[in-house]
Image: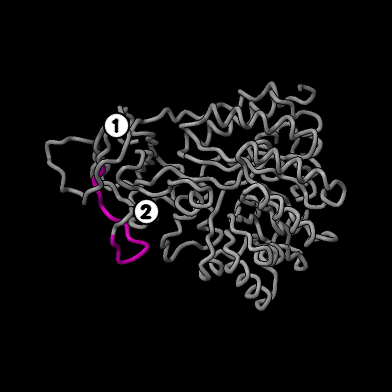
Amino acid sequence: MKPGWGAGYKGTGIIRNATVPACLLKGLQQTSVSDLTARDIVFENGKLAQIAPAGTLPEGAGGLDLEGGLVLPTLVDVHTHLDKGHIWPREPNPDGTFQGALQAVGRDRSAYWCAEDVRARMDFSLKCAYAHGTGAIRTHLDSLPPQDDITWPIFIEIRSEWAGRIELQGVCLFGIDRLAEDNGYLHSIADRVSAASGVLGAVTYMVPDVDQHLESVFKAAMDRGLDLDFHVDETLDPAADTLRRIAEVALRLGFDGKILCGHCCSLSVHSDDDISNTLDLVAEAGISVVSLPMCNMYLQDRTQGRTPRKRGVTLLHEMRARGIQVCVASDNTRDPFYAYGDMDLVEVYTQATRILHLDHPVGDWIHAVTETPASIMGLPTGRIAVGAPADLLLFHARNWNELLSRPAGPRRVLRAGCSIDQALPDYRELDRLLQKGTS
């Protein structure tokens, strides 16, 4: 890290010679979405006060010379599983498959997910995200009884404790087939979500009466004014088409809330005609899509002794061409669904660029971890604008190529204009909880 980067701030200061993506500067006229522009940034009392062309501030004003380093707003992680995080040492995936992950998480949840365990692991993940520069997170929460009685109260407490550092949203998570067994469950969990100002969610499968179950979820959300967030078609089975069905239900019922669909992997193996028809419906219904590239490449098309042939990610380019909001996110972290990760959206964006070819040109794909997920979460963040909090990431990297080539390179995180402690929590903090037999 260059000299001076460790200097603390007190909410007021100047950053000189910063490189800022033009697409993230509110109100700036630009000739291309991939423009990078040289700026001086003034912040006062924790707020951005001035964003001027580089070199136009008075020389005697002082400040930190970033020497062309990139500046981004704090990032937004719209699809995570904080309640599952970091159980890998205690319950690894035996074969790296989706079914192996389901079974391993089920065993771990039944044996260990008490309030103390869930709280410690969620807090650990949030410490990681905060240190890396994430300002908002939406997390799915396993919500089948009795886990809902444990996890949701803990989530509400943690959300309060982290207020002002990370904005948290919770989404209930259950398999849509649950509704065939217990119709009363949907109303119970929807009421819990509503009371927690959360988002109603479910995992959609090609099960009997799936259209009827989807309609029930939509109506439960409409009755309570809730947004929706689904896990969708997380498979490479070409027969899986619940994304299309979700769009059809949304249009039939006239749903006017926000809908986010995650994964949508099977779309990548559909015919061109089916893809076109589905995406036309998704665009008409105003559905947004989040791809989880690291997790899906880990799980999809995995067979022991065989090299994977398919990437397992969805069609972000085709979606965006139709005006569909698209983003990328962390998904799972060190659990049976994804053995790795550190809640670092710079890593996620870098890997997404490589996996999904979000380059040549880079364009404004940075929206996928900034403005777009912020909009989906209903947050006024994701851009750099006068009057906004001085919540910024300062990089030594000076352009996209340098950042994407060395995503773990030097960065400094400012919150309300103050340089934060970026020390990552030590995995040893969780050792006591992650020993089998400890509850």
Name the quadrant of the C terminus.
Answer: top right
Which mark is in front, 2 or 1?
1
Crowding near pointer 1: few (<14 within 10 Å), some, many (20+)? some
Q: Which quadrant of the structure image shows residue 137?
A: top right
Q: Which residue corresponds to the image point at 26% horizontal and 34% vertical from the top-left?
A: 44
Q: Nearer the viewer, residue 283 or 42?
A: 283
Label 2: which secondary element: helix
| Amino acid type, residue under disc 2 in the picture | Leu
- Residue 35 in picture, x, y percent from top left: 33, 60
Residue 126 picture quarter: top right
Return the x and y of residue 399 as percentages of the image width and height: 35, 53
The residue labelled by disc 1 is 45
Residue drawn where x is 46% and y is 45% of the image: 75
Number of callouts in the render? 2
The vertical placement of 128 against 331, above or below, is above
- Measured in 3D between alpha carbons, the distance from the residue under mark 2 to the one under mark 1, in whole angstroms, is 22 Å
Q: Nearer the viewer, residue 385 or 184?
A: 184
Is the C-beta separation of discs 2 and 1 under 8 Å? Answer: no
Q: Which residues are magenta?
A: 29-41
Q: Quick check: can you spot residue 236?
A: yes
Q: Quadrant of residue 82?
A: top right
Q: Residue furthest bottom?
A: 273
According to the picture, the residue beneath numbered tag 2 turns out to be 24
Q: Residue at x 52, y 58 (%)?
A: 354
Q: Amino acid at mark 1?
A: Asn
